[in-house]
Structure formats: structure tokens, C-alpha cells
Image (cartoon, rainbow, N blue to C red):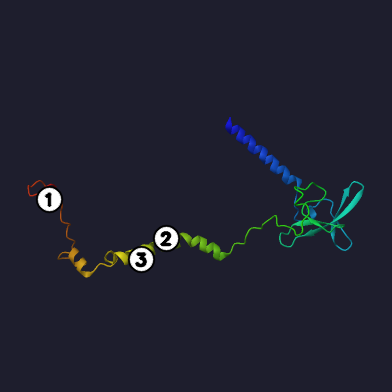
Amino acid sequence: MVSQKIVLLAVAALLCLSSGCFAQQIYRRYVDVPGIEKDSDGQHYIQVNSGDTQTKYYVARDKESKQLYFINEETSQPQWHDPRGPALSETREVLDTPETAYVPPPNNSSVTVAIVAILPILLLAGGVAARVAYLQIHYPELLWPTKERRDRRKASGGKFKPQKQRGKMNQDGKGGRSANS
């Protein structure tokens, strides 16, 4: 029952958001604007009928976002939304400078792609180098055994000596390291 309410609430929120998107459409090309005309000097414009007056809005393109916005001929104020439709809010209806609503994706640099691809290898190499540096500082004997240690591990003939047995010895009564073992 609770999950049905959550799904219903999510669908209602989605419908509200989508209706807000349909109310305002930001155009990117001149041919997408319905009813656009071209003036004799090449400037694009639209005519808006509000009651018994007709207002002319020039259509211009923002240089940064490449989106179209509308400039009222009488007041010279720019606005993003199509003046023939409702605006989303009154604060965004009239703008001093056009805002960027669409952020284009960043261009991928081949150097960036290469660094990201090699990053796991670099992390592994860095971890190994840090471990070797730690051992070099604190336990250099583990990294670079001395000749005495190498000789101690080898018997005559170059074979390794077996490790000395510790602990209880095969129940021969002689014991191991201590009497309690």
C-alpha cells in the first residue's frame, strides 16, 4: 500500500514537471520557431497578438549557449520563453542578460583519456613503490639480504638446510623447547 502511494506520488511529480517543460520551450534553431518571418534586412521576428494590439519580437541567438531568445521591439527587453506561450515564472520572464540553460558536454582531450586509462596501473605502481620504500627504511634486510645470511641458509653443496624442528619430538622422551611442550 505504501509502495503504491510512493509510485503514485512519483508519477504525479513527473507529470507536473513535464507540463512545466511543455509550457516553455527553448529553441536552438530558427526553423524550430513556429510563425517566424524574416525582415527585409535579414532580421528574424515573430508577431504576437495580445488583444487588439500586435507586438513585434525580434529573434536573436545567444553567442555562448547558441539558444534563441526574443527581444520586444517596444521595450527592448530580452526574454527566453516564446512570448506567445506562458512563462514559467515572472522572475525569469524578463532578463538583463540571457542565462545559459543548456551546458554543452566538455570536449574530451586525448591526454585526459590516456591518463584515466593508465590510472589503475599508476596506482598499482605507486602502491608497490610505497611498500618498497617502507621496507627499505624499516627492514632493509628483507629487501637486500647480506652475504652472511645467504651463506647461513645454504649448506655445503648449495642445497638448502631443512629448518630445525621445534616443539615436541616424536615422543622420544627428550622433549622439545620446554618440558611443557
The answer to whether residue 158 of the structure is visible from this angle is: no
Q: Residue furthest left?
A: 173
Query: At which x and y percent is residue 75?
Result: 85, 57
Query: At which x and y percent is residue 131?
Result: 36, 62
User: Within 10 angstroms of label 2, few (less than 14), some, or many (20 or more) residues?
Assistant: few
Residue at the (42%, 60%) spot, across then down: 124
User: Within 10 angstroms of label 1, few (less than 14), some, or many (20 or more) residues?
Assistant: few
Residue at the (88%, 63%) spot, across then down: 41
Residue that mark 1 sits on: 178
Q: Residue furthest bottom?
A: 147
Residue at the (38%, 63%) spot, across then down: 130
Q: Residue furthest top?
A: 1
Q: Please state which amino acid type lies under the numbered disc 1.
A: Ser
Asked which secondary structure carries label 3, the reply is helix
Q: Please state which amino acid type lies under the numbered disc 3.
A: Ala
In depth, the one of 81 and 40 nearer the eye is 81
Residue that mark 3 sits on: 133
- Residue at mark 1 to residue at mark 3: CA–CA distance: 40 Å
Point out the tag, 1 or 3, that comes first from the N-terminus.
3
The part of the image, by quadrant, that contains residue 77 is bottom right
Residue that mark 2 sits on: 124
